[in-house]
Image (cartoon, coloured by chain):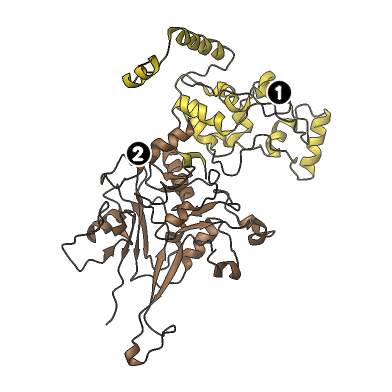
Chain colours: A yellow, B brown
Amino acid sequence: MNKYTYCLYNGKRPVSWVSAILLVLALVFSGAGLAEVPNAVPPEGEHKGDDVPQPIHFPHDTHAKINEINCMYCHTYARRSKVAGIPPTSKCMGCHSVIATDSDRIKKLTEYWEKNESPPWKKVHDVPDYVHFTHEKHMKRFLFDNEDMEVERVSEVCAFCHGEVKDMEVANKVKPLNMGFCQRCHEANGGPSDCWACHK
Amino acid sequence: MSLQNVLTNWSQYRKTHEDGGFYDYEHMWGMSVDLNKCTGCNACSVACYAENNLAVVGKEKFDKGQGMHWMRVERYWDEPDLAAGESTEFSEHGGSFLPMMCQQCNAATCEPVCPVAATYHTPDGLNAQVYNRCIGSRYCSNNCPYRLRYFNFYSYYESSWPEPLNMQLNPDLSVRDKGVMEKCTFCVQRIRVAKDTASRENQALVDGDITPACVQTCPTKALVFGDLINTESKLSKLWASHEVELGKTEQHKKNKEKRGYRVFEELNTDPCVMYLERVKEV
């Protein structure tokens, strides 16, 4: 009887001390660069998304980083709906009827506003049609039901799947958002593993 | 790893033939169909077409048995009295109707034959079909004694929903392409919404929160939907009052007048749909 069969019979996994230490070290170092949301294991995986040209070159960094506007101020529906939503033009004009009105981008925005049209924003983060994803449940689990997490720091939660959007100008897809990406996080954080929880 | 999950769920929620017991279901959605009330109007079928993005295949393909009616109303005629000179063609009397939707069997015969685990049992006691996993081997359809699984032999998107009809598609479930098996889901998208709403309001699901499209549409209220685990639900009481029990291959009724029965329960599929026999004038 060799070592492996012994382990099988014993119901134990053949883990040596060396690999155990390596595993612990790997966990420590891999966690170092990620957002530290208490009570959550962020999903792994990187992705280089294509540049999506938007009708107006929208700078996320100016809004979310420099002016520290909460993500959910504009993406209102994230807390109570499947989709996070793109803000209506009226919300942009709420500020930009007085702020930075002389910049080229805002002039373009004002044109749309006066024509009673919304800028044709392009979707950046899209999951396939057979996937049921709801922002509401994820916000509930990682933000509202998460005692150590303040609503002001919501961008750390968003960064799980959307990357550090506050460092970008026009948003870009930086996470794979495929089934492996979702599943690893669901396993680490105790999400449902039933097929029909996500597939429709 | 996800395959492992599927296989675990498979054995966890699937009632096996050796073991008559049930496992830790969260819910067990079931239905009851009163054939006395059914007028055979087909409204349930139409509602299902609208709700579940079912393709309209056209006369020719329907003739070949390729119709995609998840909810179908079967029509039966009484046997003609040949001695009295009745014709063997469609008779003028004695028609009866049987609405057939997926029976959501607890020991479903379709599940163990799927080579890719695209069909499995959910913790809700539903027999699930995962479209993007399905490779179209059609084993499940061949193994279903009720013939309630429908295969997409063609891509119907262009022909069934030409512009602007594609605007009517329900976004809560996918449009199936060719090569994929599909079946009644008890309107799982509505179950999902009801659960999400309940959890948002921090409340438990109440009987009557969920209404599948067919039940909602039935003009005579012949269909009743509910949770069989919850003994207080309208459906459970209906099952109990007609002395129909889960996990049996034959119902031993104290009162023989009770009309409840399950289709093909002797095959030990343990269906979750109860039918109430039609009382006929003699």
Q: Out of A130 and B218, give the one closest to the viewer.
A: A130
Task: Determine whether the residue tagged by mark 1 lies in a helix, strand or loop.
Answer: loop
| Among the 4 quarters of the image, the one containing residue A63 | top right
**x and y, in percent, of residue B126 in the image:** 40, 48
Q: Secondary structure at mark 2?
A: helix
Determine crowd level at label 2: few under 14, some 14-19, many 20+ residues with C-alpha closer than 10 A. Answer: some
Q: Is residue B127 above or below residue B82?
A: above
Badge 2: chain ID: B
Residue A181 drawn at (x, y percent): 56, 29
C-beta proximity under 8 Å, tags 2 and 1: no
Looking at the picture, how far across and down is residue A82, in whole percent?
A: 55, 39
Q: Residue furthest left?
A: B254
Q: Nearer the viewer, residue B65 or B243?
A: B65
Q: Classify residue A105 by image quadrant.
A: top right
User: Is residue A179 visible in this depiction of the protein?
Assistant: yes
Give above or below for B150 relative to B188. below
Which image quarter is the C terminus of chain B in?
A: bottom left
Q: Nearer the viewer, residue A25 or A174?
A: A25
CA gap, disc 2 and disc 1:
46 Å
**Residue at 31 percent of width and 61 percent of height:** B262
- Judged left or right of residue B133, residue A118 is right
Query: Percent from the top left, x then y, of residue B23?
Result: 30, 40
Residue annotated with mark 2 = B12
Q: Are marks 2 and 1 on the same chain?
A: no
**Mark 1 sits on what residue?**
A168
Along the line of sight, which residue is nearer the eye, B249 or A57? B249
Q: Amino acid at mark 2?
A: Gln
Asked whether residue B212 is in view, the answer is no
Instruction: Judge from the rendering whether residue B118 lies leftward or rightward of residue B250; answer left or right.
Output: right
Judged by depth in the image, the label closer to the viewer, 2 or 1, is 2
Residue type, numbered disc 1: Met
Q: Which mark is residue A64?
A: none
